[in-house]
Amino acid sequence: MLSKCTVHYFQSECKIIYAHPILLPLSLTACVPLYFSSKVDHWLEFSAQRVCGQSGLAAALGELDKALELRTFLVGHSLTLADICVWAALTGSSEWQSMQTQAGAFSHVARWFAFLGSQVPFTAVGHKYTNSKAPSRNFNSEKEKQQDLGKFVELPGAEMGKVVVRFPPEASGYLHIGHAKAALLNQHYQVTFKGKLIMRFDDTNPEKEKEDFEKVILEDVAMLQIKPDQFTYTSDHFPRIQGMAEQLLREGKAYIDDTPPEQMKAEREQRTESSHRSNSVEQNLKMWEEMKAGTEYGQTCCMRAKIDMASNNGCMRDPTFYRCKNAPHPRTGTTYRVYPTYDFACPIVDSVEGVTHALRTTEYHDRDDQFYWVIEALRLRKPYIWEYARLNLNNTVLSKRKLTWFVDQGYVDGWDDPRFPTVRGVLRRGMTVEGLKQFIAAQGGSRSVVNMEWDKIWAFNKKVVDPVAPRYTALSGSYSVPVVIPEAPEEMKMAVKHPKKEENKYLNSLTIIPSSLSLDPRGKVTSLEGKLNLENKDFKKTTKITWLAETPHAPLLPTVCVNYQHLITKPVMGKEDDFKEYINKQSKLEEKMLGDPCLKDLKKGDIIQLQRRGFYICDQPYEPIRFVLSSLQGLHSFLPVLGGMRG
C-alpha cells in the first residue's frame, strides 16, 4: 500500500537524490495496475534525469504541464510514486521556486504541486526541505483549494464534490466514437471533481425512440467502463416541461403558429415575423388546447418562442419549442400528443436535475443563446455550457443513416464490425478503453474542429498494449519453407512471453548453417537443410527468419489473420460528395496462417503481438477446426488497428 511506503531522500545543492533503481520495482508493486506501471517508470526517470538533471528545467516543466492539463495525478486517478518523486524533485529545486512567483507560469504544474503540498504528509516534508525563499501558498479554507483545482479543466465555478455533468444520448441507434468522446469527457470531470454523472435518455421524439436501443446504449456505456451515478429520462419531466410551456404562453413569451413548414422556413431566412406572432394570450391558449388534443387542426400547429426575428443568430428567430407527434411514446404511451423539442427540454431538465456544467460540441454554439434564453425566461438556475470540438475522423462517416446503409447493403457484418466507428466496432477491433481515454485527454479542451487520422488514436492505444501484450509467432500459410535439421534434438523449454530487456531480445534465436537448398522451376525456395551452430551467438550479423518448430507433440495451429482497411477511400467527404462513390469493396482481407500452438490458450478479447507482423486481438477463441485473428495494427497501407482472432 502506498500509505505504508516511506520514501527517503536527501537534499544536496538543491537537488533531490534518491534510489531510483529501488523505486522502479517498487512502482510495479505499489497497488499500481500493470498497464500503469510503465507510466510510473517514465515519471521516475523524468524526475531523476529531467528535473534533477543538469539541463534547463523549463523544457521539462513544459512537458509536465501538458501532461497535467486534464489530470489530478500523473498516473491514473490516485496518488502513485510518480507524483511523490516528481513533487519531491521540484521541492528541492530553487529554479522551480523562483518560477512560482511568475503569474501564469506552468499553471497546471503549479496547481498540482500546490494540491499535493497541501496534503498532510507532503506538508511535513515541504516545511522541512523547501528553500526559505520559496513563495508561500496559503490555503486557509477548503474553498480556496476547490477553486484552485477547478481551474485546470477550465470549468468556471467548479468545486470539488459539487460538479454535476450529464450524458444525454437519444435511444435511436448504437453509440459511435464521437459519443464515446462525450461520455468519457463527462466521466473525466465526474472523477476529477468527485462529482456526479447523470445518464439521461433524451426521449423527446417518440418516432425515433426505441426501447431496444436503450439496452444497446447501456451496454455500450458499460463497455466504456463508465458508471453513471443516476439514470433519468427527459420524459420523467414531461408534466413540468408542459407546465413551463404554458407559463411562456401566459406571459406572452411564446405563441402558437399554424404557418406551413416551408413558409415558416422562408420567413425565418428572410427575418419576417409570422402573422400569429401578435396573437393574444387567449388565442394562443385556445390553439394550444387543439395541439394537446391532437385534433386535425392542432396537428398543423407548433409552439414557437417569441425571441428576436431580426437576430443575426438564426437559432434566436422564434425557434419551435413544441410540436405534435402521433406516434405512441415507449414510456408514456398515448398520454401526450405534443412533445417538446430537445432545445426546449434540455435547459429545463439540466437545471432541474442540478447539472452544473453542460458539456457539448462547438456545433451547438449558435444554440447557446437560445439555451440561456429559456433559463432566463423561466427564471431557472443557470448551468454553465462548456464547449469542446467534435471528433472528426478521416475516411469515416458517423451519420446513423449512412452507417445503417452499410449494414443493410451487407458491406459490413453488423454494427460491431471492426471497420465501423461504433463503440462496439472499435473495441472489437482492439481499441482499449484506457487508450481512448488517453487520446481524449490529450485533446484537452480544444475547440478547434479538425479532421484527424485514425493513426493518432491507435498510437495512443499502442502505448497501452505494447508493454503488456504477449509475443507469439505465426507463419504464412501460403508460403512457408520447411527447414530440416537432422541432428536437432526435440525438447521443450519455457520462454518469456514478453521479452523486454536487451539480453532477452534473442532469447528464442539460434543459428543454423545451410547445407542444401531446393528450388522449384521458378527459382522459389521449397525446402532447406542445415546444421545447428549453437556456439554462434552473434545474431546481429546473420540473416533473420521467422520460424516455428514442427513436431507431432505440438502441431502448428491453423489460424486466420484478418486485416482491415478503411470503408471509405476519400479522407474528407465534402457536403456535395456521395459516400457511395467512395466505398472500398476490398476493406477486409483474410490470410491463412500457421500459428504457435500456444495460441489455442487465448480467450476472446486477448491482445497479442505476432512477431514481425503487428498487434492482434482474439476475436474467436480456439476451436478444433481453425483459429482466427484480426489485425490491431495493419501492415503497410492497412489501418493500424488491432485485428481479431476467430477460431
Image (cartoon, rainbow, N blue to C red):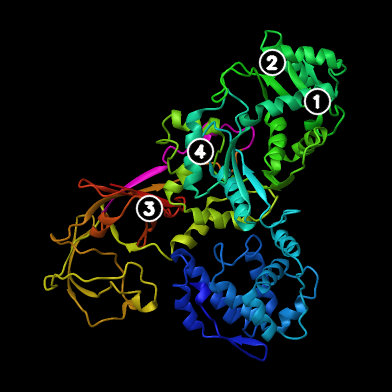
Magenta highlight range: 574-594
- Dot 1 amino acid type: Leu
> Which structural element holds mark 4?
helix
Give the residue displayed 65% in from the left and 80% down from the top: 124
* Residue tagged 1: 248
Which x, y percent locates residue 646?
31, 46
- Dot 3 amino acid type: Ile
> What separation in Å lies between label 1 and label 4 (alpha carbons)?
34 Å
Among numbered discs 3 and 4, the one appearing first in the sequence = 4
Q: Nearer the viewer, mark 3 or mark 2?
A: 2
- Dot 4 amino acid type: Ile
* Residue tagged 2: 292
Say few, some or many: other residues with alpha carbon within 10 Å of mark 1 (under 14 / 14 to 19 / 20 or more). many
> Which structural element holds mark 2?
helix
- Residue 383 shown left or right of residue 515 in the figure: right
> Which structural element holds mark 1?
helix
Which x, y percent locates residue 131?
73, 86
> What separation in Å lies between label 3 and label 4 (alpha carbons)?
23 Å
**Magenta span has 338?**
no
Q: Quadrant of residue 275?
A: top right
Q: Nearer the viewer, mark 1 or mark 3?
A: 1
Q: Nearer the viewer, mark 1 or mark 4?
A: 1
| Dots 1, 4 in contact, CB < 8 A | no
Q: Nearer the viewer, mark 3 or mark 4?
A: 4
* Residue tagged 3: 617
Say few, some or many: other residues with alpha carbon within 10 Å of mark 3 (under 14 / 14 to 19 / 20 or more). many
Give the residue displayed 47% in from the left and 83% down from the top: 22
Give the number of the disc on residue 217.
Answer: 4
